Amino acid sequence: MMLEKLFSPLLHACGWYRRRWRRPEARGTALVLVYHRVAPAGGRAARSEPPGYGVERGVPLDVLEAQLRFMRRHAEPLPLSQLLRREPDAAPAFGVSFDDGYADNLHLAAPLLESLRIPATVFLNTDFVGTDRLFWWERLGEALRASRAESLDVAACAPELRARWSLPERLPLASDAQRESAHWQLSMALMRTPPAEIEAALRALAGAAHAKLPERGRAAPLLDWDQVRELRRRGFELGAHTRSHANLAQLDAAECEAEVLGSVERLAAELDAPVATFAYPYGGPEHQSEAARSAIARSGCEAAFTTELGAVRPGSDPLRLPRMGLTRGWSFACALKTDRALHAAPPGAAIGAGGAAGIGG
């Protein structure tokens, strides 16, 4: 793996990746890109903002354009709702998705996508649309940023969380790098914590850090319903992402149904149109369950997307479709990640195995 990464510029330049993608087994496949926020070209927003401590910053617009142009050179762009309706021997395709419903999806990403004639889907947490509410990982990030504590005594303020997920007894907070690491470790634990317990854990952590825990006051605005409808008028698809960005694997059947059907029904009512697609919050294997899949099937959604790396293929499970994230704009980096996705094993049959997904998926 490391050798391939090291030699990926050469492999890309000599056409090795391109020849692999033209093999017969690549027919009928599709790759789905997953994004969250979008930043102005050149990454100016990321440089001017204070440290984020793991909070989603967004891909710079110029990097997004380079990635989309790379994908368009090698595959046909299609709406996510059409990926499962293709012939088995169809040419390779790709789709584009954005999770969580940030307003920059409309203001920055939409004009670029329209200029390149690439369709996209935005997945929405319907309880957050049009609000100034912060997601829990953003609230944690704000508390850590405001804290002047040198360390966080996890053993004292969150003993159950520490024991359950083997967190360190203390997390240092003396530098931005240490706070970034603390945010990541705590988020990985909270991501797998029952949603009903997250609020109490956040308050305990913020109290130990001697920091306020804000509920509102967004630096990165979310879409409102008028903007959601504008996206639809401009040809974008809108999908459901639960009501509150809950980890569905930590909910019982009734709670899953409330989160899934509640988000689908609200979105359908606001758009006066059926909802065809769904994306699991966080998106890893440990964030899915049979109860969630059953609720998604009953909601009328035809496809549900994870953040597991892989390609959509003929015969793929429509309620466990993979996506991939691109991190760089260089063609060889896009080629390496694309090749790994095309040759990744399909999502396993046993839900609950595997590693954690990124924050805010």
Image (cartoon, grey):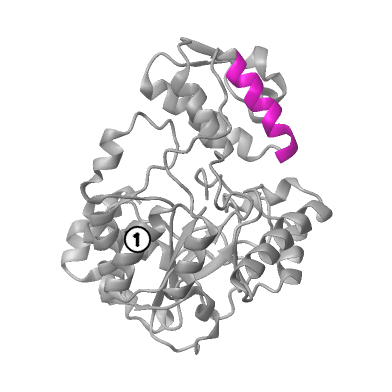
Amino acid type shown at disc 1: Ala
**Residue 317's spot in the image, x, y percent?**
62, 72
Q: Nearer the viewer, residue 261 or 285?
A: 261
Toward the front, the furthest residue is 226
Q: Is residue 301 left or right of residue 326?
A: right
Residue 87 visible within the image = yes
Q: Nearer the viewer, residue 76 or 299?
A: 299
The residue at the point 62 percent across, 72 percent down is 275
The residue at the point 59 percent across, 52 percent down is 281
Q: Is residue 16 left or right of residue 190?
A: left
- Judge whether 78 appears above or below 216 on screen: below
Q: Number of callouts in the render?
A: 1
The residue at the point 56 percent across, 28 percent down is 214
Q: Examine the structure image and report whether residue 199 is included in the region drawn in magenta.
A: yes
The residue at the point 53 percent across, 67 percent down is 238
Q: Examine the structure image and report whether residue 275 is included in the region drawn in magenta.
A: no
**Residue 141's spot in the image, x, y percent?**
49, 29
Q: Which residue is mark 1?
A: 109
**Residue 246's spot in the image, x, y percent?**
66, 47
Looking at the rendering, the stretch of residues picked out in magenta corresponds to 195-207
Residue 311 visible within the image = no
Q: Main secondary structure of the magenta part?
A: helix
SS at mark 1 in the image:
helix
- Judge whether 346 appears above or below 209 on screen: below
Q: Quadrant of residue 118?
A: bottom left
Q: Quadrant of residue 136?
A: top right
